[in-house]
Amino acid sequence: MGNENQFYLFSPVAIEVKDLRSEGWILDIGGGGEGVIGRLKSRDVVAIDCRRDELEEAAVGPLKIVMDARDLQFLDNTFSTATAFFSLMYLKTREDQQKVLHEVWRVLQPGGYLHVWDVDLSERPETDKEVYVVQLRYTVGGVKKETGYGSQWPEEKRGIDYYVKLAELVGFRHVQTETNSHTFYLLFRKEAQADTLSNP
Ligand SMILES: C[S@@+](CC[C@H](N)C(=O)[O-])C[C@H]1O[C@@H](n2cnc3c(N)ncnc32)[C@H](O)[C@@H]1O
């Protein structure tokens, strides 16, 4: 990753990526790079990423498609499950994140789930470094791996509340939160219309 002095390094976090219950295809947003969800669910995964090289780098198994998550080329109500494993942090603006969440909501079936893993940037540490790196020691399917995900500090404070509000704005219901040091996991559900009516 070049000269590490250029980056603000968060201390390494150990994450166990547990199995996901899903029916049919899982849409993985920003599924290039390590392709963690592809390692977990292999051929059940449709991995989309705007960068061809990132998809080429990812492990074989998933169906890999070059696509911008802000403009998904799938029909409405296609997937029962979607995932974003440290991908939302790569979107530079709130508008882009909102577009992606809206698109994911659109292509999910009613009752479908969105699983998000990301970094809590609600507090910015004292640093003059423009780029931060989240260091992960992750375990997937019993295999241990290490990686670092780097991006520029966003203008806004992006913590759990920020992501929950953004997802709720496009229509998701927040179901679950787990925190792990400065990272988190959030689960959201696209309510079926009948659920929405009975739980206003
Ligand atoms: C480094 S990966 C994050 C980790 C990845 N999910 C994994 O399992 O290793 C983030 C990816 O999001 C992709 N990305 C950023 N903006 C995107 C967009 N608008 N549409 C699709 N992919 C995007 C980047 O190209 C990058 O490959």
Image (spheres, helix red, strand yellow):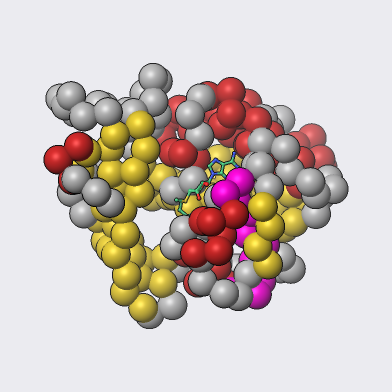
Give the quadrant of residue 76: top right
Task: Say whether residue 42 is left or right of residue 198.
Answer: left
**Residue 30 image offset from top left, x and y in percent:** 55, 50
Q: Is residue 22 above or below residue 178?
A: below
Residue drawn at point x = 57 percent, y = 49 percent: 51
**Residue 49 image offset from top left, x and y in percent:** 60, 51
Q: Nearer the viewer, residue 128 or 18?
A: 128
Residue 46 covered by magenta stretch: yes
Residue drawn at point x = 28 percent, y = 44 percent: 133
Residue drawn at point x = 22 percent, y = 38 percent: 7
Quarter that holds the C terminus:
top right
Give the quadrant of residue 182: top left
Q: Is residue 50 above or below residue 40?
A: above
Please say whether residue 176 is visible from this viewpoint.
no
Task: Say whether residue 196 is left or right of residue 92.
Answer: right
Range of the magenta residues?
42-51
- Spot the residue most to the top: 155
- Spot the residue most to the right: 75
Please say whether residue 76 is visible from this viewpoint.
yes
**Residue 114 image offset from top left, x and y in percent:** 60, 49
Task: Say whether residue 32 is left or right of residue 2.
Answer: right
Give the quadrant of residue 64: bottom right
Residue drawn at point x = 40 percent, y = 20 percent: 156
Residue 9 covered by magenta stretch: no
